[in-house]
Image (cartoon, grey):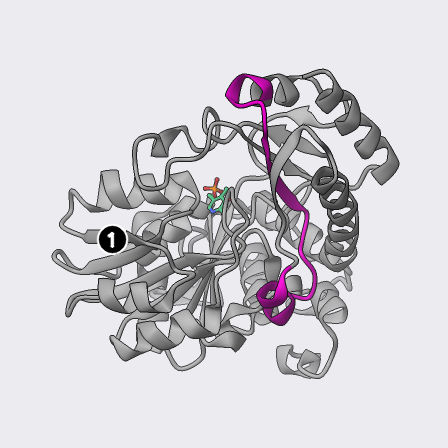
Amino acid sequence: MTQSDWDDSAFETRAIHLGQEPDPVTGAVVPPINLASTFAQDAVGEPRAFEYSRSGNPTRAALETALAGLEGGAHGFAFSSGLAATDALLRQLEPGDHVVLPDDAYGGTYRLVNAVHRRAGLTFSSVDLTDPAALDAACTDRTRLVWLETPSNPRLRVIDIAAVSAVAHEHDAWCAVDNTFATPYLQRPLELGADIVVHSTTKYLGGHSDVVGGFAAVKRGLDELAEGVGFVQNATGAVPSPFDCYLVLRGLKTLAVRMDRHSDNAARIAAFLRDHPAVGEVYFPDGELARKQMRAPGGMVSFTVTAGENAALRVAGATRVFTLAESLGAVESLIEHPARMTHASVAGSPLAVDPALVRLSVGLESADDLLDDLRGALDSV
Ligand SMILES: *Cc1c(COP(=O)(O)O)cnc(C)c1O
């Protein structure tokens, strides 16, 4: 079978087989972890498929084929972290170019733009991307990239990918979507009009809290952009190890069943929190727009504790099944306080987070155990 033979298959089938056909020599049904750093050449300057593992590696190639295909992209590039993937994209811009960021985004993305690329001459604006008119007004004749994250971190806001892409294209800018929270099983931005999808594979794609990685997929037809991202991948060398690529490939195979269960568990928890007297706002992407562009809401739920910051801190420290930790998207449930943990780097910026907010990454434990755990923590404040 070749890649295109899987085009008519469903997502679940493609996640297991795309780029991962049995090894032609041994028949191994799992792509080997190919640790070679260099590959024999037939003659001077005549490498075979691979030459040197920063430039390309068979295990990485399997991941790049699989994940680019699942996103519906023509090109895929694996990186050593999500931020390395974002950085490779930002490096496609020139000094003086302008980037639009959402006003609710992963703190590290904001830091990368504000503290690294701004020094290299990029300019940026933070905009409420739930309002396409605000985006239109923020674009300048130097705007080349509109970045969005949906559902967003940590407020789980849903942004209309088709609408934002359309405005970006009117201004001759690319639209890039951080699809980390949704994954291609729940949402495929390239099919909705976006040009680039970026992932932290550290989260749901790896899915087991045992790998840090990133990915960028580029839409069919944007060959020059893809070439530029591939050039930076090789030139700066922030590539994942073959073992890390294997772990993400392994995660992809169970992605669909995991996301279904993450979504079911999170929906029960969101319903419980919406009824709880100690809870103020509950953020969970199950509204009309979410249902239009996502298959299911995913596993992230955020909420405010009515009694304020100190009570929120006590809740985050009082659970037993939910582990107090940063990161998200794995089999075990996590709880955190964004203002002091994941989003400390955006304090005082337009992206600053309500200190009464608590974020949950709902895992695959029994929903009943998770509800008991949260009930106990909320009753203690
Ligand atoms: C974690 C995360 C990132 C950064 O990814 P790393 O793998 O930690 O570099 C980017 N975007 C979102 C939404 C994330 O959750």
Give the position of the C terminus as an image quadrant: top right
Is residue 21 visible in the rendered image? The answer is: no
Task: Judge from the rendering whether residue 271 lies leftward or rightward of residue 89; answer left or right.
Answer: right
> Residue 184: x and y, percent?
61, 63
For image coordinates 71% across by 70% down, the residue present is: 11
- For the N terminus, the image quarter is bottom right
| Residue receiving disc 1 | 125
Does 150 appear in magenta? no
- In this orientation, does residue 164 appear? yes
Q: Residue furthest front?
A: 277
Q: Tag 1, which secondary structure?
A: strand
Residue 191 coordinates in the image, percent (x, y) = 53, 76
Numbered-mark total: 1
Rendered residue at 75%/28% (across/down): 374
Which residue sits at x=25%, y=75%? 171
**Quick check: is 298 in the magenta stretch?**
yes
Q: Residue at x 78, y 21 (%)?
A: 376
Q: Quadrant of residue 61?
A: bottom right
Q: What amino acid type should be assigned to the residue bearing mark 1?
A: Ser
Residue 280 image-quadrant placement: top right
Spot occupied by residue 246 in the image (x, y as percentages of width and height): 64, 49
Position of 85 relative to 378 (above/below): below
Nearest to the observer: residue 55 or residue 377: 377
Label 1 neighbour load within 10 Å: few <14, some 14-19, many 20+? some
Say whether mark 1 is within 8 Å of ligand 1.
no
Horizontal side of residue 375 vs 218, given as left or right: right
Q: Is residue 118 left or right of residue 149?
A: left
User: Residue 33, how many percent across, how many down?
Assistant: 64, 49
Nearer to us in this view, 322 or 306: 306
Q: Which residues are magenta?
A: 287-311
In the picture shown, does residue 265 fall above or below 371? Answer: below
